[in-house]
Amino acid sequence: MYSLASPGLPVSAHSVLDVVPQLPGQSAAAALRETVEVAQTADDLGYRRFWVAEQHGVRGAGGASPAVLAAVLAARTDRIRLGSGSVLLTNHRPLVVAEQFAALAAAYPSRIDLGVGKAPAVPPSTAAALGLSEKGWDTFPQRLDELCRFLRDGLPGRAPVGDVRLALAGLPPPVFVMTDNPASAQVAAVRGLPLFLGHHTAPAGTLASAAAYRDNFEPTGPTGKSYVGVTVAVVAADTDEEAVIRLGEYVRVKSRLRTAANRATPAELMELLEPPITGRERSKAERLLDEPGYVVGTRAGVAAGLASVAASTGADELMLVPLAFDSLVRSAILRTVAAGLTRAIRSVPRHTPHFVATA
């Protein structure tokens, strides 16, 4: 479908990770609509997956329910795989997650992924609202095993797990482990599961995590082959100067949302987000230019940077995190990256009905 114009992975080996950005004063409906538009852009351009992250209590991030969002996005796209990047398994009962994604896989065959990970430390109020305890953070391997048993043994003709039979059991979605540390990478390896590494959040541990995974991989999973994906934060534009400006704008907004008072009103937050960028924010953006998990620049520069990340990590797939709150900018970044990887961008008209399950 695509002809490569530069070395590295083709567009079809690149994916997208999104957090459903929502700025103060923006309605939930508008934030969802914009994320749908970005997913449709990724679908049209031939990207492989579009995953949404699970985050709770984070200003500017509306992706708290990956299963619900995957359903919304799947209904409005045609070909791209939808999923979670990731469901924080220590926040949920494995049976509930298995049932949610089994239903999605039944509704959208061969288009649903289930990425899972461990919940990071969260503020006490958020932990209490989620019903979390410190003990739960150490149960990830056991919950992963339980999840996989429900998905595997819930198939027709298979015995239930204990006395529990999975609702809407069918062809299960593939399970991926998403992490940024060697310990969890090894958890994926010994179970033969594919892995995604958070290179844009913890680049210092990427190579060690990839090595731990490959060294301990057991070919007992669904495919019998190791598979490593790597996340990369990306800002692409027509010129290097424009790309750096876009990165600075993203840093300005994210930094101010993070440091704002907990009880700040939407009006106060909107005022806080007004430009111009401060010297400290500009310095932070400049430091990110040297981070190995960030690729910023022109079409050709980003293509070369992504090829370098793929080569240095041995990644089978790169998952792009387009750094922008504005959906038009996120879509523009994806188009620019695709243009750097292909000679011709082909968009295929979408004809998907709202629900695509077949009898």
Image: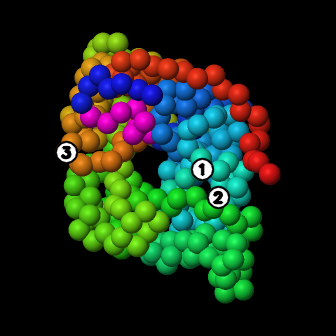
Q: Nearer the viewer, mark 3 or mark 1?
A: 1
Residue 262 on image: x %, y %: 56, 45
In depth, the one of 163 and 275 nearer the eye is: 163
How far apart, in angstroms, are the residues tagged by discs 2 and 3? 33 Å
Name the secondary structure under disc 2.
helix
Task: Judge the density around disc 2: few (<14), some (14-19), many (≥20) Cα neighbours within 10 Å.
Answer: many
Name the secondary structure under disc 3.
helix
In depth, the one of 79 and 315 nearer the eye is: 79
Q: Which mark is residue 110?
A: 1
Residue 57 on image: x %, y %: 57, 50
Reading the image, the residue beneath label 3 is 312
Left or right relative to 210: residue 278:
right
Residue 13 is one of the magenta-drawn residues? yes
| Contact check, label 1 and label 2, Cβ < 8 Å | no
Quadrant for residue 36, please give it: top right
Residue type, label 2: Phe
Residue at 27% over, 20% down: 300
Residue at 64% over, 58% down: 101
Residue type, label 3: Ser
Q: Of label 3 and label 1, which has the lower sequence position?
A: 1
Quick one: which residue is furthest to the bottom in this view? Answer: 162
Residue 34 is one of the magenta-drawn residues? no
